[in-house]
Structure formats: C-alpha cells, structure tokens
Image: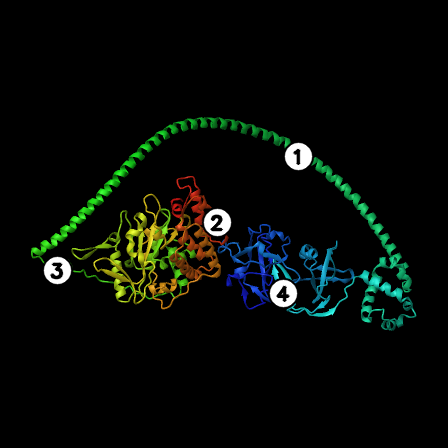
Amino acid sequence: MKRGNISNDQFSYREDSTLRFSNNNYIIVVKDEDFPDRNVIPIIYYDNGNVIDIDEYDMEKVITLTNNYYPDKILSNYNNVNQILKISYGSIISNDRYTEGSNFPKCKTFASNIHPTDKNDIIEVFNGIIDESTSRIKLSDSYLDSLILDIYVEDNSPIFVETDSKIIGPFKVLNKDSEGYFIVEKHLWKPFGEYKLTNDSYIEFTANEITRKIHLPSFNKLEILQIIDFKDDTEIIKEFKYVLSENSEAFDKQKIESLLNILSQTSRIKSIEKYLSENKRIAEILKNTENIIISNKELAILIPEINNIKSEIERLQNDEFELKNNLEKSLTRKDEIQQDILQKQEKLDLLNSELENLSKTKEEELLKIKSGLENEILTLQDEKKNLENNIKNETESKSKELVLIKENLEELKKAEEDLKYSVDKLKVENQETQRDSLKGLIDLFKNKKYFDFFSGRDLSEYDKKEEREFIDFSVVDTYSDYIQFRTELISILNKSGRNFDTHFIDNLLISIHQNTLTVLAGLPGTGKTSLARLLTKILSPKERISEVSVSRGWSSQKDLIGFQNPLTNKFHSAPTGIYELLSQLDYESKNKKYLQSPMAYIILDEANLSPIEHYWSTFYNLTDSTASETNLLSISLGNNLNFEFANNLRFIATINYDQTTENLSPRVIDRANIIQLKSSSIDYKNDINMISTEDIKKLNISYEKCIEFFNLLDFQSFNQSIELSVEIESIFKDIKEKFNSLRIPISPRVEISIKKYCLVARNYMKKEISRPLDYCVAQRLLPMINLQGDLAKKNLEELLNIFEKNDLKKSYEVLKKIIETGNEDSIFEGNYNYFLTLTYA
C-alpha cells in the first residue's frame, strides 16, 4: 500500500491540542534534505496498531527547536539524512514564524522529542539483487548505500530484499566490499526464507525524491512461503567435501547411476531435492573456477571424472601469451606518450618565459599607478589635517555658545516655573469666581421666577418640555456568520488605507463589544482616534456615534452629559451630543426596537486629559451589568430624569501618557481592555480625515447579531458555562500565581472577562491556541503593573520566562519593554510601570 491511500482520515496536530506522543503512538519521519539540521518530513502516524495518513496541508514539514532543558539533543545528532526516525514524545504546535507564502513549516516541535526507530517499529525493504554464492546483496538504488553502512551495519538491524517479485530475508548486513556489494548473513529476527509479496506487505512512500518501503510488524502482514537455507559457495564446497569423504565409494564411474538410491537410503546425507540443488551449484563452481580445482587436490582425487585440468592449464598459458603481447604494445604506446609530453613541456617553458616578460611590463605600470596614488593620499592627508583644525576651532566656538544657551535655558525654566505657579493660582481664583458667579446666577434665576410671578407674568414656559423627533434605525442583517462579516470589514479597512492582521481585527471587535469601555493607548500619531472613527463609521450610522474631545478640568457628569436646571426644571445638555444619543436609546427601549438597531458608540478623544473616574462616573456601575427584557440598564440625570437603554452603548477612549495627562486609576484599569497601538505595526496609505462618510461602506449589523457573534450575556435565557481549555487553564494558573507573588491581585471581574474573551476568540483565532490568552494578559493584566525595586524586577523576569515558554509573544514584548524602561538610566530607573512604555518610541 502507498502513503496517502492507507486510511480514509488524515492526522493533523490541530485536531487535539492535548495529544502527547509516546512509544505507542508516534509519527514516523525522515530528515528534510534541504534543511537537514532543522526540518523533518512526516510520513505516517502510528497509533496502537493503526496507521493514519498525514494531513500534508497542515504538516507537510515540521521544524525542530532546541529544548533549553536538553540542549545536547539536536537534529544534527542523526548523521544520515535518510534515517527513519519517530516523534515519540511531547507534542506538536503551530509555528508562529510561519506566514502565507514563506518557506517556514506551519508547525514545530522540540528536537528532544525525536528518537530513532528499532526493529519492533519498522523493517525496511530494499530493491536489489542477491548473490547467494558469495553471501552478498547489491541495492538497486546506490544512494541508499550510506544509509546501510551508517544505520543497519552499525545497529545490526534486519532488512528485507525485494527481487524478482519476491521478498527474501531477513538479512543482517556485515560490511561492504570493494565491488559495491554488501556482505550479509541470515538475521535471527524471523525465519529466513521467501515471503509472500502482497499489497499489505509494506508501506511505500517517497521522501527527498527517493521511493522507499517499510514493513510495520504490528500493522503489515508477512506470510512465509518457504524456508531457505542461505549458504555461500565456500560453505557448500565444505559440506560437499565432507559428503564425498564419507561416501567416496559411491562416486566412481560404475556406481554413479545408483547414487540417488544410496542418498535416499542414507540418513547421514541430506534430502535429495536439496542435495541436487547444491550439486548444481557445485557443478557451476567446478566448471568456472580453476582455483578451486587446483587448491582442492583431495577433492580431485575423489572425483575421477576431472580429466580436463591439463587442457585448462594450456588455455591459461595461451591467455598469458596474449597478455604479454598486449603488454608490449602498451609499453610502445607509453614511449609515444612520453615523447609527446616532452614536446608539450617545451611549449609550456616558452609560454612561461613570455608570461614573465609581460609581468615585468605590468609591474612597471603598477609602480607608476602606485606613485600617483601615494601623491593623492598625501594631498588628502593635508586636507584632512586642515579640516581637523577647522573642526576643532568650530567645536570650541560652539561649546562656548552651548554654555550660554544652557545658562539661558536655566533662567527660562525658572521663569516657566514662576509662570506656572501664577497660572495655577489664577486657575484656582478663576474657579472660585466661576462658582460664585454660578451661585449668583442661580440666585438671580430663583428671584426672577418669583419676580415674574409677582409681576403677573405667565410661568407656563418654565415647565414646557421640548418635543423631539426620533429615528427608526432598524436594519436587516446581511451576514449569517462572523467570518463573512469580518472579511467584508477587513476589505473596507484595506480600501480606506488600513491594513491589519486578521487576529488584531478579531481582538479589536471582541474587546469593544464585550466591554463597556475599551482604551486605545499609544504615542501621538499612531492613529488611535482615526482608527476608532473609521471603525465606528463602518459599524453604525453617524447619528448613533458621538465623538467627544475631553478637556482639562472636567470633574462631573455635567461636563460629559449636561445638568438639570432646578429653576426651570429643564435639562441643559452638554455640547457633546451624548444627551441626545441617550434620548434616542431611551426611545428605542420604550418601543422595543433595540435588538434590530445597530450598536451606539461614543469616542472619548484624549480621555485622560481629566480623570476618567470623575466625569464618567455615571457609567461606572453599568460596566458589569447585563440587560434583559424586564430589566434594562438605567441612568439618573437628576430631578427624576432617568434614561433606560439596552446594553448596546460602547465607549472607545484614546489616551496619551505625558506630563499633561492624568493617570488611569486602578478602578478604570480593572474595567477596561487597554489595547496598545504601535506606530511600527500600522500600515495605512490615506488619512481617515480625508475620507468622507459617503466613501465608507456601512455594514448592516444589529445589536442582536452582535450578541450572537461576540457571545454577549444580554437577553440570554440560560446561564453559560465559561471555562478555559485544560492547556490554557494551566498556563493561566502559572500567570496568576506569579501575579500573586508580585502582590497584584486579579479580581473576579477581570478573571471572568478573560474567560469570556477566550471562549469567543478561540473560535476565530484558530492558528495559535495561546493567542487569545496572550491578548488578554497584554490588555487586562500587564496594565496593572506599577512596581519598584530589584525584587520586583526579579519576579517580572520570571514572569517573562513564563510568557516565552508558552509562546505568549505580545505579552512577552510588552513586559520586556516594561523591564527595559525600568532599567534605563533615567528618572524612571527602578520603576516598572506599564504606562511608562507609552512615553517611549
């Protein structure tokens, strides 16, 4: 049977992430001749007596890595590229270095997981010829000779030989002679003989452009047809001599006819059939081998028929005469060749003489060129000295100027500090003045209402409510599954000049929709605001998006939403548009139209110019809430003014981190996914500000479809089980223990959020099992790091090793930057803080 046609199913490491290999289940492999010290080629998967074909799309090749615990176990330890090996320990995982179209294999394992096979695993079947007379075999494919010498001679492993549509063996290979034959003898692993050749006798495969055959004892079938007494000519002659010496009277001319009867009646002599077979070989040997006839005088005495020895010697003498004639001709030819050599040598001497003359001429020309170059070098050296003097003078002059500039800078810094103190003082005075003015204005309004009342004016206008028209945003979903929706979204982003990895888009969408608040962090100019603006324009109509530019000094709800005027009993909305958006959501909740409507989004640009926990406090307690038909979310705006809405409002905040911004409090960090954008990871051709709303295609996706795609808990009639896989749970447990040693507690809110994220992301990020947890750690846990001291550094380095060991690349990169920032010789030295990395390129 041939590889690829063995089983209906195909084996892939992706099917079971918990699979571990052993001596009962393993993958048979050979080294890749293109990269013999790095890659192996999987042949078949063996599992307790069953053989399954390999899924070549996922596992065409496997790259091997050095295990830090076993640095000596490397692939180059196996010298022969065609040796058959097995992956019988550990596991195989995805290769993170693989990208579409690259030469890297898609999966990887440790070299320490690879071991040699033995005769209980496989027996190789070679095509070749068998010379029983000399106990030798010769392979049809000579490029496998090195494999025989390196592996089968060294390990005394058995082999079979397929010849003339028969399988013969098993053989034990002893060595190789000068004619390219292998000296062999019978191997005791199985009875030696001819075995039946069927489709089930072995598995045929091609690797490194070599077709080979292997017999698996526990899978393939071998049926012996006849036992063969494998002997060379020397052994047969020895036995024949013994038979003749013991039965000499039976071999004269008169008794030759009765030989068979005597053989059949004599128990000391072997069976007739076998004896006849061996006698045929004896006859061949006697006919073709003069040396045997001459050396075995004792044998010649016992066989009177051998009378042609003299004639044979005469023939050999004639051959000797012819050889002498040929030798004389060869000597004559040798003299002619020697004469020709002398003539050629004379010509060579003449050419050498001409070459020597040319060399002298060339040397003179080179000396002239050298002299010219030396003059040019002297000129350049003089110029260099002049330049050095000019640079020295200029440096001294600029140094003096620099000292003056530094002195002026110090004076300006002092002046700046004085001005800053004055400004801060004026701000405090201004705030006090504003409060006093506001209080006076409120008192004036109070008095005005009473004055109007006593003046007999109509007060109905004070209680009159504004009428507003609301829009029906109901949409018909056009996407039946998430992959279709994501593909279209990526296409729109690409057309708008934004090219992101697919898993980054998955992370962005899951984070935004599973959390009330998502923070985009990074250096100025990394595209945080433009990305939020573009994404929301694709997902929702512009009337359901509010972009808010946060200002310094925001301290309460009135700055973000507005405030209720107690005099007029009217709500004065802030110029952010959030009040109007909440009104629309309240209308939809009262009319049961929220499930068919798109999500609503609020972008908080430069969100940390003021403390988020102050002006965003209205929404704090809603971050852990879920909505149901009988229990929607509610916010109070004062004086019995309440808005209800389904949990279909999301906030996207963008932050920078410098001296002008506020730190994010632990309460905010505990409630948000913080996605760090790097300038090097952004690839965009157009500025989003140059793209009009009409140019961007809208995706009709409702709140109900978002609940389905991102597994939101709103409007669910049953409780979901949120558990991590065994492998991911083990990694997460190690990380939690290390955070406990850092004295950074992981709250139940954060742990539940991580599990909810991984439950959804593992269905969309299938290439790497650990990627969902990697994103969660980088966005939910690492922002909590704010430590000092050498002990903290030691614990962080141990955590870094856990990330590297478990292939958490993004978390490794962020934590490594935190440690590097804390190690720098600056004012931050010894401080290990996530947000300090945002101040560095």
Q: Residues within 10 Å of mark 3 (few under 14, many from 20)?
A: few
Position of residue 530 relative to residue 245, above or below, is above
Structural distance between the alpha carbons of marks 4 and 3 = 96 Å
* Residue depicted at 43% across the width and 39% down the height: 825
Q: Which mark is residue 798?
A: 2
Q: Is residue 659 left or right of residue 254?
A: left
Structural distance between the alpha carbons of marks 3 and 2 = 71 Å
Kindly give the residue lying farthest to the left in the view shown.
455
Could one spot residue 766 in this view of the protein? yes
Q: Residue 460 carries which label?
A: 3
Local secondary structure at mark 3: helix
Structural distance between the alpha carbons of marks 2 and 4 = 48 Å
Between circles 3 and 2, the one closer to the viewer is: 2
* Residue on which disc 4 sits: 203
Decide which of 308, 740 is in the foreground and name it. 740
**Label 1 sits on what residue type?**
Leu
Label whose residue precedes the other's in the sequence (2 or 4):
4
Label whose residue precedes the other's in the sequence (4 or 3):
4
